[in-house]
Amino acid sequence: MKKIIAILISFASTSIISQNVPINFETNGNGANWTWTTFENDLNPPLEIIANPDVSGINTSSTVAKYTALQNGNPWAGFESMHGADIGSFSFNSSNCTVKIMVWKSVISDVGLKFVSPSSAAQPEIKIPNTKINEWEEIVFDFSSLIGVFPEIVDQIVVFPDFDLNGRTQDNIIYIDNIYGSVTNTSITENKTNAIQVFPIPSNGVFNITSKGNNVRQLVVYDLTGSEIFKKPMINNNCQIDLTNKIAKGSYLIKFTDENGNLIATKKVSID
């Protein structure tokens, strides 16, 4: 009898604490038939599930999600799954705290992710900018800092595809695919990104940069349209750049590359 009870308890726990991932928006997969709700996006056009408009590059899947961020929508406009039934109820641990998402965007801006509990208590969102436009790119989010953090049990995913506090000058179409496409405990890209620090943010135009264990040889500053603004070689692991009187106030991206020109990390900064 005790064995039967133990089995039933184990089965119930497994049924309640589980994730429906990856979210690939395919007919027989996860996401295509979920109840997605859009928010803070002016007229709130619905999330669309469409054929992949660009099967070149890293994403050759058949079906993707299409989100239209309206010019009059709020910077934090986005879409969210239904509580419970869609992504399921789960807590972060070492096996699921790395979340990958593929995006295709025509502009550079933050992509944000957050997870919410059944009682609508939200964990802090994490925002990372895309670094490419007009092609698929995979962005890696590290939620390991939220392991054991209230609320521990979450059952909703919220996506902010075009989070830009500077506002939009037009409607922006973003394609999204393969959320949780690959789950790993650690990420080489993420580790390299975390090893590069840029401070203070925001700044008056002077930024201090430290790099630990990376073979960074050059940094390039871009505006959010992708235009190159400033370039500087990195001779050692610590340097300072002074953009005072060189560029206007606003948000910019700093890309760090190795001696072969390979991208190591991208940091978003702002000048007040």
Image (cartoon, rainbow, N blue to C red):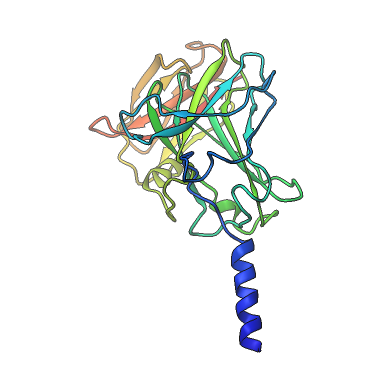
Judge left or right: residue 138 versus residue 121.
left
Q: Is residue 4 above or below residue 78?
A: below
Q: Is residue 44 above or below residue 93?
A: above
Could you say which is closer to the camera, residue 238 or residue 25? 25
Judge left or right: residue 93 versus residue 44.
left
Can residue 237 be spotted in the picture? Answer: yes
Could you say which is closer to the camera, residue 91 or residue 17? 17
| Residue under the point 48% across and 22% down | 108
Q: Is residue 18 above or below residue 166?
A: below
| Residue under the point 44% across and 52% down | 183
| Residue under the point 54% across and 52% down | 20
| Residue lying farthest to the right in this orientation | 119
The quadrant of the picture occupied by the C terminus is top right
**Residue 155 image position (x, y, % from top left):** 65, 50
The quadrant of the picture occupied by the N terminus is bottom right
**Residue 255 image position (x, y, % from top left):** 39, 28
Can residue 208 be spotted in the picture? Answer: no
**Residue 196 image position (x, y, % from top left):** 43, 39
Which of the 4 image quadrants contains residue 240?
top left
**Residue 32 image position (x, y, % from top left):** 53, 38
Which of the 4 image quadrants contains residue 222?
top left
